[in-house]
Amino acid sequence: MNLTLLIGLPLLTALLVLLARSSHQVKWIALVGSVLQLALAFGLYFAFRQQRVIDPASQMLFEQNHPLFESLHINYHLGVDGISVAMILLTSFVVTAGVLVSFSQQNMTKEFYFLLLLLALGAYGFFISLDLFVLFFFLEISVIPKYLLIGIWGSGKKEYSANKLALMLMGGSALILVGILGLYFTGGHDFDLINLSKASLSGPAQKILFPFLFAGFGVFTALFPFHTWVPDGHSSAPTAGSMFLAGISMKLGGYGCLRVAIYLLPEGARQYADIIIVLSAIAILYGALVTMMQKDLKYINAYSSISHVGFSLLAMGMLTQTAITGALLQMVSHGLMTALFFAVIGMIYDRTHTRNVDELGGLMKVMPFISTVFFIAGLCSLGLPGFSGFVAEMTVFVGSWQNNDPFHRIATIAATLSIVVTAVYILRAAGRTVMGPINNHSFEELTDAAWNERLAAILLISGIIAIGVAPGWLNDLLKPAAEIIMNRIDGK
Amino acid sequence: MPNATLIALILLLPLAGFVLLGLFGRKYFRNSAGLIATLLLFAAAAIALYTAYEYFFVYGRTGGVYQKFYPLQFTWLEFSKGLSIDMGLLIDPISVMMLVIVTFVSLMVHIYSLGYMKGETRFSTYYAFLGLFTFSMLGLVVSSNIFQMYIFWELVGVSSFLLIGYYYDKPSAVAACKKAFIVTRFADLGFLIGILVLSYCSGSLDFATLTERLTSPGTMAYGNALSYSFLGVSAITWGTALVFIGGAGKSAMFPLHIWLPDAMEGPTPVSALIHAATMVVAGVYLVARLFPVFALTTPRVLELVVWVGVVSAVIAALIACTQTDIKRVLAYSTMSQIGFMMFALGNAGYGGAQGMGFTASLFHLTTHAMFKALLFLGAGTLIHFVHSNEIRDMGGLRKQLPITHLTFLVACLAIAGIPPFAGFFSKEEILFSLYSRNRLVYWIALFTSGLTAFYMFRLYFRIFWNKPPTRKDSHGHPEGGLAMTAPLILLALGSAGAGFIPFGSLVSTDGKAIESSISPLFSLAPVALGLTGIVLAGWLYRIQNDRPARLASSFKGFYRACYHKFYIDEVYLFITKKVIFNAIGRPAAWFDRNVADGLVNFTGSAALVISEKIKKIQSGRVQQYALYFLTGLLILAAFFIYVFVSQAGISDK
C-alpha cells in the first residue's frame, strides 16, 4: 500500500472543497473525501495485518524513502507500525464524525471545511512520517488551522482562547524544534527516526534533549502544568474543532512523546520517568477534582480530558511494556470517547443554546437519542466495561502495578482513585443534564438528533464498543510496537 | 461433561433480550417487549435448571467430590505473558446454584412486571435493562477469571444504576442512583486494587491458578505474598482485605450500606431482583469464590468479615424496627440477613465439618433469595394497591388482598426462622456452625434473629391487621391478575420448601458432602425467641393502640438514633460536601484558573511589558545607534583586555 495516498486524499479533498460552488457541494465533497479516507484507513489496517504475517521482522511496513534535501539529509520517509495504523484509524473516525456534525455549519462553510481538512492532513502526515523534519512539518500544519477555527467560528472569549492555544502550542513546537535539532547534531546529522534509533546517543546528550522533546510534545497533550490552553481552547472552539483538538491534536502530542522522546532517548526517559509520573498523577487527580467543580459541559469535558490524558502519560512514565500498550490504548480510546462527548455537547448546545448544567435538565424526555449518546460517552469516560475506556485504564493499571516499589505503587493508587472522582463528575453532569425534571419549558419543543448527527454518534460509538467488547484486535496491533519501544528502553 | 453452548446460552439469551429491546424496543416492541423478554428468560431458567440437575446428579461428582469444570475459556485481553483477562465459564457447585437462583428470581420478576409495569411509557427500556442485569449477574457467577468477575461486577453495578434511576425525572431517583453507583464504585476501587495485589502476588488472574498458588505453601508466589508487607501487614492480607471491601460495598455492609435504602427508589420488582435476591449477595459470593485463599492464607481477614457482618446485621435489624416505609424496612432487613451470611462465611474454616459455616451461608443465600424476593414482590402489590410506601397508609388489608396476605405471611415465617419454612433450616445451620466456633457471635446472632422476627411481624401485623385507614376503593383487580399473583405463589412454595434441599451434600468448601446433624433441642432457643418476637409484635401492632408510641418514648434517645439510621448518612454528607467538594475541589478549581493559568497569562503580559520597554531602543536615530555601538565596543575592548591581562598573568607565573 502506498502511504502517500493517506496524505494525498485529504489534500485532494481540501483542494476540491476550494473549487466547490455552493456550501452544499462543500459539505458533500468533504464527507465523501473523509469516508473514502475512512475506507483507506480500514484498507491500511487489513493490508498491515496481512503484511505483518508475511514480514514479521521489519519494524516498519510499507516504507518509502525519497530524498527531499540531500545536503541536509532530509528525506520523505514514510512507514507505519501498529501504533501508526491505530492512530490513522482513530483520526479517520474522528474526522468523518467531525465532518458529519458540522453539516449544520452556515457561516463561511468553504473556509471552515478547508481548515478542518487541512488539520486532518497534518495529523495523517504526522502519524506516518519517519523523518523528524517532515514530522515536524506536519505537526505545524495542524496548528494554524486550530487558531483560525477557534478565532473565527468559536464562541465565548474566542480571540483570547485562540491566541492562548496558538501561542502555547507554538511554544511547545519551539521546544520540539530545539530537541529535533539537538538530535540532528548529536545523532550524526540525520533526521531519520529509524537511523536515530540505531545511533548511540551519549547519556548526557539524552538527558539534555529529553526534556525539550517530552515537554514540547507534552504541551500538545496537556502535560501538567502546560495544560491551561485545554479548557479555554476546547470551550471556545466550534464542535468539530473541539472534537479534532481533543480527539486528534492531543494524540499528536502523546504519539510524539512516545515515538520521538521516549523511543529515541531511552536513557533520558529513564532519567525523567519519575518526574513524568508525578506530573501525570497530579494531572489525573487534579484534573478530575477540578472537573467536579465545573458547570459548563465543555469545561467538564476539557478538564476530564486533562485527567484522562494523564493516564496515557502516567503509563509512559511507568516504562513497562503493558503500561506503554495501555498508554496507546488510552490514546485511541480517549480520542473516540472525547470526540463523541464534544459532538453530543455540541448537539445539546445547538438546541438549547446553553451548556450550563444548572440550566439544563430532563433532556432524556425530549431527545432520547442524544441523551443516550451522552450517557454512553459518560459511561465510557468513567471506565465502564464494554466500552474502550475500561480496557485502556485497566491495561494502564496492570502495567503500572508491575513496578514493584512504593513510589510507583502510590502513584498507581493515586491514579486509580480518579475512577471514583470520575464517576462523581460524570453522574453529576448526566444527572443534571439528561435526567431530572425539565427545568425550562421551552425545551419541550426541541427535536432529537438529525441523520448526520446520528451517523456521527453511531460511528464513534461503534469504535468505542469494538474496542470495549473485543479489545484483542487493537491490543495485537499495539503490543508488538510497544514491545520494540520497551526493548530499546531496556537496552536490548 | 457440561455443555458449553448450552451454558453460554443461559447468559446469551438475556443479553439478546437487552440488545434487541435496547435497540429496537421503542419502535417495534412497545407492547410485546415484556413477553419477548419473559420468554427468553424462561428458556434461560429452564436451561439453568437442567444444567443444575445434570451437574449435581449426573456428571458433577467424581469419587464423592464435586469437580470444577471449565467448558469454555478464551483470552480476551492479554497484558503480558501469563497475565491476561480470560473469559470463561466456571461450573462448580456454587456457580450452578447461583445460576438457578438468578434465573429463577429473574424469571419471577419478569413475569410479575408484566402486570406491575403495564402501561409504563418506557416498558421496553425496562425489560432491556432487566435483561442487561440478568446477563451481567450470570456472567459474574460463572466467571473463571477474577478480572472477568470485575468486568461483570461493574456491569451489574451500572444496570442497578439504570434501574434505580428508571424514573429519571424524579429528583429523588436521580440522587439515589447516583449515590448507589458512587458508593459501590468507591468500594470497587478496593476490589480493583485488591485484584492488582493478588495478581501481582500470584502472577495470574485466573481463579484456579491464583487460588492454587496462593494457598500452597512452598511455592514462590506464596512466599512472596507473605513476605512483602506494607504497614506491617503482608501483601496478601492487603489483597484479600481490599477485595473484601469491594464485596462489602456491593453487599451493602456497614459502613458502605448507605446506598441500599435509597436504592428503593427503583421500581419495586427491581428491588426484589437486584436489591434483595441477587446483586447484593455478590459480596458473599465473591468471598465464597476466593474462600480457600481467605481461609488458608489470610484467616485474619476472615475475622474482619465476621465483624463487618455482625455489625451490619445488628444495626440494620435495629434500624428496621423503627422505619415506616415498607421498602426501607425490607432493605434494612436485607442488609441484616446478608450480615448473617457474611459472619457465617467468615466464621467457617476450610474442609470437612469446619466448612459448615460456608455451606450454611450459601444455604441462607438461597433461602433468602426466595423469601426476600417474595416479600418485595408482595410489597409491590401493596404499593400498587394503596399508592404509598408508608405502612401507616396500609392496615387491615388481609381481606382485600388474600393471596398477598398468605404469601407474605409465609415469607415472614420463613425469615423469622419458624419451622418448617426455609429460613428455619438455613438459620439453624448458621447458628449451629457458630455455636462451636465462636460463642460470642452465636449469642449476637441469636439476639438478632429474635429482632428479625419482631420487625418482620411488626410489618405483617401493621399492614394486614390493625385499623385500615380511610381510602378510596381501588378499581380493577386489586392483586393485579395472574401475572402478579403467580410469581407470589411460586416464590411462596420456594420459601416454604427450599429448606428441604439437602444443601450440605451439594455445596461445601472442598466439594465433599457434609453431614449436618442438628438436634431438635438445639433449635429450641432460636425458635422460642422467634415466637417471642412474633407475639410481641402482635401485642404491639395487631390492633391499633398507643403501646408502640409509649415504647418508643421510653427508649427516647436510642429510638431516635435508630430512626435516623445512626446518623451515618449525615457523616457521609459531611465528608463529601464539606471536605471533598468545598475543601479540596473548590480550591483546586480556583488554583487552576488563578495560579496555573495566571502564570500563563502572566508570561504573556510580561512579554508584552518587556517588549514595550525595550522597543524604545529601536528609535531610528543614528546618533543613538552610534552611542550604543561605541558603548558596546568599549565593553568588548575592556573585556578582551581583562582576559588578555589575566592570561598573561597566569602564563607569567
Image: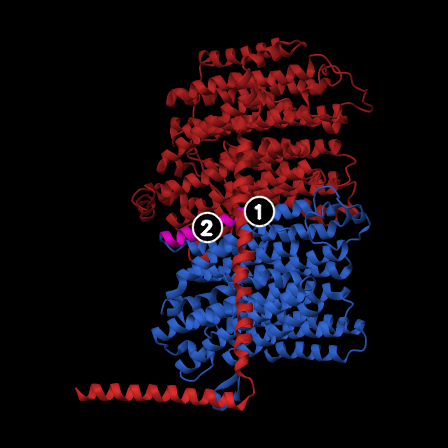
Please give the name of the residue rendered at 77% of the width and 46% of the height, measured from the top-left corner: A440
Left/right of residue B453 with respect to residue A40 in the rendered view: left
Please give the name of the residue rendered at 43% of the width and 33% of the height, measured from the top-left corner: B511
As drawn, the label of residue A211 is: none
Q: Which residue was labeled with disc 1? A: A423
* Residue A416 is covered by the magenta coloring: yes
Give the secondary structure at mark 2. Answer: helix
The chain carrying label 1 is A
The chain carrying label 2 is A
Tell me whether marks 1 and 2 sit on the same chain: yes
Please give the name of the residue rendered at 45% of the width and 78% of the height, measured from the top-left corner: A194
Left/right of residue A74 with respect to residue B538 in the rendered view: left
Q: How many numbered discs, if any?
A: 2
In the image, residue A200 above or below residue B116: below
Q: Looking at this view, is B496 or B407 the one in front?
A: B407
* Type of amino acid at the residue the image marks with label 1: Ala
Q: Colour of chain A?
A: blue
Badge 1 vs badge 2, beta-carbon distance below 8 Å: no
